[in-house]
Image (tube, grey):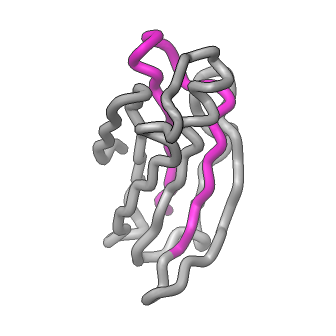
Amino acid sequence: MGKLSTHVLDVTQGKPGAGVKVALFAVRGNEKVLLKNTVTNSDGRCDAPLLQGDELLAGRYELVFGAGDYFAGQGVQLPAPRFVDEVVLAFGIADPAQNYHVPLVVSPWSYSTYRGS
């Protein structure tokens, strides 16, 4: 059975993004359903998979990361409004038997992601 996981890397400090709020939504048509709220641990990861086994279904999802609040909490001087604030990663799961790892590599000025396993 597959699973969905994530982690956050703070490229401005070259370390894991610890304490980042993460929300997971299922996207069904025009409706978004909140599935989980969590916070990254000291390694920038969630303590458990976001979804696994029978919870992981094919479909569209969104991860929302509280990057702006994280950087403000790190003492980074940010403009108002913040350039990178909430980072929304929209992605699809085609085969729930596989592992989907959706990391966030972020700074106050940019972000990227990729599909890992």
Rendering coords of residue 14 (x, y %): 43, 11
Image height of 44 relative to 6, above or below: above
Residue 17: x and y in percent read: 56, 25
The quarter holding residue 20 reads top right
Is 34 drawn above or below residue 47 in the view shown? below
Q: How many marks?
A: 0
13 and 36: which is toward the camera:
13
Location of residue 58 by image quarter: bottom left
Q: Position of residue 113 (x, y in %)?
A: 32, 42
* Residue pictured at 46% horizontal, 87% vertical: 30
Residue 70 horizontal side relative to residue 3, left or right: right
The residue lying furthest to the top in this view is 13
Which one is in front, 18 or 70?
70
Depicted 41 relative to depicted 113: above or below:
above
Q: Report if residue 23 lies within the magenta region.
A: yes
Q: Residue at x 53, y 69 (%)?
A: 56
The residue positioned 41% from the left and 77% from the top of the image is 59
Q: Tell which of 92 and 27 is nearer to you.
A: 27
Q: Is residue 41 magenta?
A: no
Residue interval drawn in magenta: 1-26
Q: Residue at x 55, y 36 (%)?
A: 68
In the figure, residue 98 lies in which quadrant?
Answer: bottom left
Quarter of the image with the C terminus in it: top left
